[in-house]
Amino acid sequence: MSLYGRKLWETMSSYWPTGDEQPNATPAEIEFARNWRDTPKVVFSSTLDKVGWNTRLVTGDAVAEITRLKAGDGGPMEIGGATLAGAAMRAGLIDEYVLATYPVLVGGGTPFFTALDSWVNLNLVETRTFPGGVVLTRYETRR
């Protein structure tokens, strides 16, 4: 299951529903687009009226809903969007961090790592480098 804040949801849903149909789509993009459509998604927003593409809209307390989802079947969840991830991070709801870095400096935006009351100790699990300088790094939280 993927959990999205509104801004990232709008970005993702504007391209990935048909990303595999784009003329220059790479095999990785085709696979990602198909996986994106098939993956259940939850969008947290107080301003959206509707969502599509195998997605449910939550307009209430995001931390309470993520806590409820974690207590459910225990299936893996990924969180996208700096504001939503920051709220989950402050509530201690994140078990693993997967960071994708791209070789672009944007000079603004919402910081992913917001102020925390205490340190979060991490164990490095994996680092992978992809074409174009994209680096994916996975960490587990130490509890």
Image (spheres, rainbow, N blue to C red):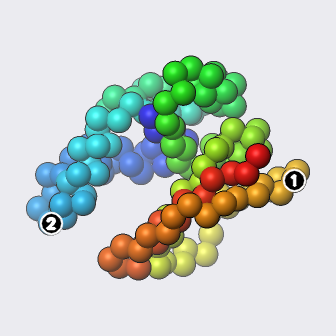
Q: Where is residue 124 shown, x and y percent of the image?
A: 61, 64
Q: Residue furthest left?
A: 23
- Labels 1, 2: front one: 1
Tell whether 93 sits left or right of 119. Answer: left
* Residue type, label 2: Asn
State the residue position of label 2.
24
Position of 45 with respect to 134 (left or right) is right
Residue 34 at x, y = what percent? Answer: 23, 44
Question: Residue 105: which quarter of the image?
Answer: bottom right
Quadrant of the rendered image containing residue 25: bottom left
The secondary element bearing badge 2 is classed as loop
For image coordinates 63% across by 53% down, the residue present is: 140
Comes first in the chain, label 1 or label 2:
2
Q: Residue 69 lies in what quarter of the image?
A: top right
Q: Which residue is mark 1?
A: 118
- The quadrant the N terminus occupies is top left
Residue 131 seen in the current view: yes
Residue at horizontal 69%, vertical 31%?
Answer: 63
The residue under label 1 is which amino acid type?
Ser
| The one of 121 and 98 positioned closer to us in this rendering | 121
Horizontal placement of 120 versus 111: left or right? Answer: right
Residue in view at x 43 percent, y 45 percent: 10
Disc 1, SS? loop
Does residue 58 show up?
no
Q: Residue at x 54, y 27 (%)?
A: 74
In the rendering, at what x and y percent does residue 55 appear?
A: 40, 29
- Cα–Cα gap, marks 1 and 2: 45 Å
